């Protein structure tokens, strides 16, 4: 990287981090994306993954600025120079230095110093720990199996998403006060075949159509992979009013900044974060291209970005919490008229 260019690191190669990278690349600003995972093989990219609910004012707006819509991560990666992504880089620690620079320690891959570090490293963000000591919250809802949303008055839910290649992914949400439900129930680590009946027992009060959906999902998963295990994990979130004091040289976006329960908004606002943050970086770069002058120009712009992002995330978080509160309440199916039709059909 030329010495007269800013040193920018993006930690995390998900939609938010990759979107930021593409937009910086399109504006001639150098950067490096550090991703924990190894570069996916073509066969892995062909595997069906969860669908994206991209909205006109956020996710799609971001895509129009960089790539066409479809196979999001693969397309974003294809728009980046190969050398700009460092795969298999696990961040061990991040440290702010006296002159507003940030040092990243990647263990065997060495340490590097940057003028700006963008933390797009998800729920368990190491970059977030530079800004605040606040922790994520455990939720009482568990995603039991990643296999139309149907609600039951027992606080549980079943959702299904159609995917590419005539595939579908089924999710079973279990509401429980037991934060160790995965282990205590015996479902975590269990194969789909051996745990199928236990899973259906949790839905004992549900109608036959939903049980049939879950049964078929389990059977087809077992047929495709006899050793397939339940993908069960807690639903984590950050406080709705989560915020931090601005610190020069570092910021966070996406789940690292506003982790919330699944509501169809997470990827949208994460990509919108990337759009707004890169606008600030581009403006600072136009004023001062490198070093301390770049950091000085960038700092107030990032601070303004963070204030706006936090307000936007709080509004979305409140709306999501209210929606989920209605959906998972005792009268969930009746509270949500849109979902009632599907629930009655399931009966």
Image (tube, helix red, strand yellow):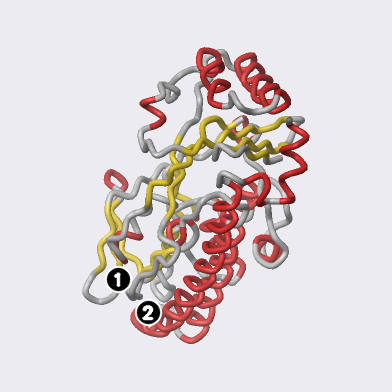
Q: Is residue 300 above or below residue 93?
A: below
User: Label 1 neighbourhood size at 10 Å, few (<14), some (14-19), many (20+)?
Assistant: many
Q: Is residue 80 visible?
A: no
Q: Position of residue 310 (x, y in %)?
A: 47, 71
Q: Position of residue 178 (x, y in %)?
A: 37, 36
The residue carrying mark 2 is 295
Which residue does the image show at 31% across and 66% down from the upper left? 131
The residues bearing labels 2 and 1 have C-alpha atoms spaced at a distance of 8 Å
Give SS at disc 2.
helix
**Left of 48 or right of it: where is 128?**
left
Quadrant location of the N terminus?
A: bottom left
Q: Position of residue 56 (x, y in %)?
A: 72, 64
User: Label 2 neighbourhood size at 10 Å, few (<14), some (14-19), many (20+)?
Assistant: many
Give SS at disc 1.
loop
Point out which mark residue 83 bears.
none
Q: Nearer the viewer, residue 169 or 180?
A: 180
Contact? badges 2 and 1 (CB < 8 Å): yes
Q: Nearer the viewer, residue 248 or 105?
A: 248
Mark 2 vs 1, N-terminal side: 1
């Amino acid at each position: 990287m030329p010495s007269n260019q800013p040193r920018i690191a993006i930690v995390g190669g998900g939609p938010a981090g990759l979107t930021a990278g593409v937009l910086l690349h399109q504006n001639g600003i150098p950067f490096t994306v550090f991703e924990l995972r190894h570069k996916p093989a073509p066969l892995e990219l062909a595997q069906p993954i969860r669908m994206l609910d991209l909205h006109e004012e956020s996710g799609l707006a971001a895509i129009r600025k960089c790539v066409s819509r479809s196979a999001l991560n693969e397309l974003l990666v294809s728009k980046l120079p190969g050398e700009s992504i460092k795969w298999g880089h696990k961040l061990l620690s991040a440290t702010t230095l006296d002159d507003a620079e940030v040092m990243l320690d990647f263990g065997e891959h060495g340490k590097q110093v940057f003028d700006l570090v963008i933390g797009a490293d998800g729920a368990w963000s190491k970059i977030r720990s530079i800004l605040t000591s606040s922790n994520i919250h455990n939720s009482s809802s568990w995603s039991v199996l990643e296999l139309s949303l149907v609600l039951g008055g027992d606080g549980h839910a079943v959702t299904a998403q159609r995917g590419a290649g005539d595939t579908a992914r089924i999710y079973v949400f279990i509401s429980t006060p037991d934060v160790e439900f995965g282990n205590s129930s015996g479902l975590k680590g269990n194969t789909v075949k051996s745990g199928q009946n236990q899973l259906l027992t949790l839905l004992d009060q549900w109608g036959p159509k939903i049980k049939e959906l879950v049964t078929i999902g389990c059977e087809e998963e077992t047929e495709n992979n006899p050793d397939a295990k339940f993908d069960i994990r807690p639903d984590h979130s950050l406080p709705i009013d989560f915020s931090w004091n601005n610190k020069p040289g570092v910021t966070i976006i996406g789940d690292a900044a506003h982790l919330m329960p699944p509501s169809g908004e997470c990827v949208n606002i994460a990509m919108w974060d990337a759009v707004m943050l890169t606008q600030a970086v581009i403006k600072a770069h136009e004023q001062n291209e490198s070093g301390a002058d770049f950091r000085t120009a960038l700092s107030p712009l990032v601070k303004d970005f963070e204030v706006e992002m936090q307000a936007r995330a709080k509004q979305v978080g409140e709306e999501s919490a209210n929606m989920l509160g209605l959906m998972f309440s005792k009268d969930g199916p009746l509270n949500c008229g849109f979902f009632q039709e599907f629930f009655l059909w399931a009966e």
